[in-house]
Amino acid sequence: MNSLQLWERYKKNLCECPSIGLMLDTSRMNIPDEFFYRMEPQLQKAYQAMDALEAGSIANPDENRMVGHYWLRSSNLAPSQEIRQDIEKNIQAIKDFTFNVHAAKIYPRKHARFTRFLSIGIGGSALGPQFTSDALGTCSDKMLPIFLDNTDPDGFERVLAQIGSDLDKTLTIVISKSGGTTETRNGMLEVAEAYRKANLSFERHAVAVTAVGSNLNKTAEKNGWITFFPMWDWVGGRTSLTSAVGLLPMALQGINIKEFLNGAALCDGLTRNRDTRSNPAALLALSWYHATGGHGAKDMVILPYKDRLQLFPRYLQQLVMESLGKEKDLNGEVVNQGITVYGNKGTTDQHAYVQQLRDGVNNFFTTFIEVLKDHNTDSLEVDPGITSGDYLHAFLQGTRNALYEKGRESLTITVEKLDPHSVGALIALYERAVGFYATLININAYHQPGVEAGKRMAGAVITLQNEVLAYLRKNSGKAYSAEAVAEAVGATQDVEIVFRLLEHASANRFPGVVKKTGKPVIASTYEIAGG
């Protein structure tokens, strides 16, 4: 196809969305017209399913709950007055709390004001807030954001060392809908201990975002935390960015949450349109289906050409893969669905894996994300009449052309500028595209049985660890192989796990397991020294 033919194809396939400052180009996906016609009945079904979801139907039958993240930015759409009032009350409470923190009306005991905040969460309670913080933060932020998002002891030390002597000026936000998320609970306990070691009251520095009645909610109320903000069972973690999970950190940082919500709401309205050719979320879902054969045959590569969007691929990994990666469809048939997502920022990607994208295995499709406005100040000319931003734009166009030249398909999303409004729109665009695609492939996008299975298995490992250590303590001073310990505690089917538990225990000072290395290593013996 020559350049003039490509131009004609571009004009035909460009979806313009001026109300949200966004364009979607599908011209390089090679989607034939007959594909649109063939998929239209399924898309109409997807529109109907989305209407039912927004009207308050039970969208997650596994948990018998509604899915209402769209109501968070358009509370008038909520199916009951109670929910509508809860949403509006919560947004106002976030604004009031933030104002009082910034105005030093809420302040730490040993300092005049909070100057930073530490957000503790994992998954949807971390990825979204981290993304918006990095995408929209400036050098004049009201408060410095810091995130703790794992249960890695070394990670705890690094974050606390970064805070250092400013711990007394740090507001800590603990985010967990259930209130029992292990990683978040561990982070909270480690941080609380750091406050106590610094002779500070953790409770006077702590805020919770959790479900009413959760263990975290009860802890916050019992111990006199500053306040708490509710989460609701109809908001899933990966779609919680427009709830207090995302709004509270954004507001404290100084990001305009009203514009963020407006951008998301406008995109929601735009993507309710049942004219597929002018609905960018439907076009995304349709492109995914075309590229993957409706069964994840190709990976989704996200390439944002903007440093501020470098965390967007990580955010989309959870949104897309946790929503679409399902073993069974809605009929109970085994389908093993999903789309693998990965990405890096441009032009960094051109020095990393574009070589394979262009010349290697053709097992992907790319989404380029372009931001037209470089920045808010005058640009330096690095060559006569050429700026660094011009080079960034040229690399995007060049890579896009280089991939197409080799038959590699791509989408391009263009936004006019990066601000709270456009970021809110991007979030809403992908949320709805995921919902549409889930209907096209007949799966439930709003549950995560695989994640829950991993949590259950992790709990079983901790139980086995307690049994192993109890046996060694009972027989202190005696050394045993992993196989002997496994047999003693009735875990012969799990001897590999016992071996790995002993290896981990002996590598750390606590709980005092001593290893005598064998040859091969699986012949090693372990003991807890006698008192």
Image: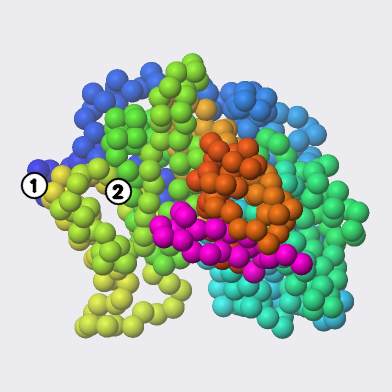
N-term-proximal mark, 2 vs 1:
1
The N terminus - image quarter: top left
Q: Residue furthest left?
A: 2
- Residue 108 screen position, x and y as percent: 83, 74
Name the one closer to the observer, 178 or 8: 178
Is label 1 in a helix, a strand or a loop? loop
Please report the bounds of the magenta region as a residue range: 509-531
Q: Amino acid at mark 1?
A: Asn
Q: Nearer the viewer, mark 2 or mark 1?
A: 2
* Residue topped by disc 2: 366
- Residue 97 screen position, x and y as percent: 79, 61
The C terminus - image quarter: bottom right
* Residue topped by disc 1: 2
Name the one closer to the observer, 169 or 490: 490
Q: Amino acid at mark 2?
A: Thr
Q: Looking at the image, can residue 424 be seen?
A: no
Q: Looking at the image, can residue 512 be seen?
A: yes
**Figure quadrant of residue 380:** bottom left
- Answer left or right for 194 relative to 492: right
- Kindly identify the residue that appears in the image at 27 percent across and 44 percent down: 364
**Circle 1 crowding by C-alpha within 10 Å: few under 14, some 14–19, many from 20:** few
- Kindly identify the residue that appears in the image at 68 percent across and 35 percent down: 234
- Answer left or right for 441 relative to 151: left
- Kindly identify the residue that appears in the image at 45 percent across and 35 percent down: 325
- Residue 388 screen position, x and y as percent: 31, 76
**Figure quadrant of residue 12:** top left
**Is there a contact, CB below 8 Å, between mark 2 and mark 1?**
no
Q: Is 45 located above or below residue 28 in the figure?
A: above
Q: Is 243 located above or below residue 134 in the figure?
A: above
Is label 2 in a helix, a strand or a loop? strand
Residue 208 lies in the magenta-colored region: no
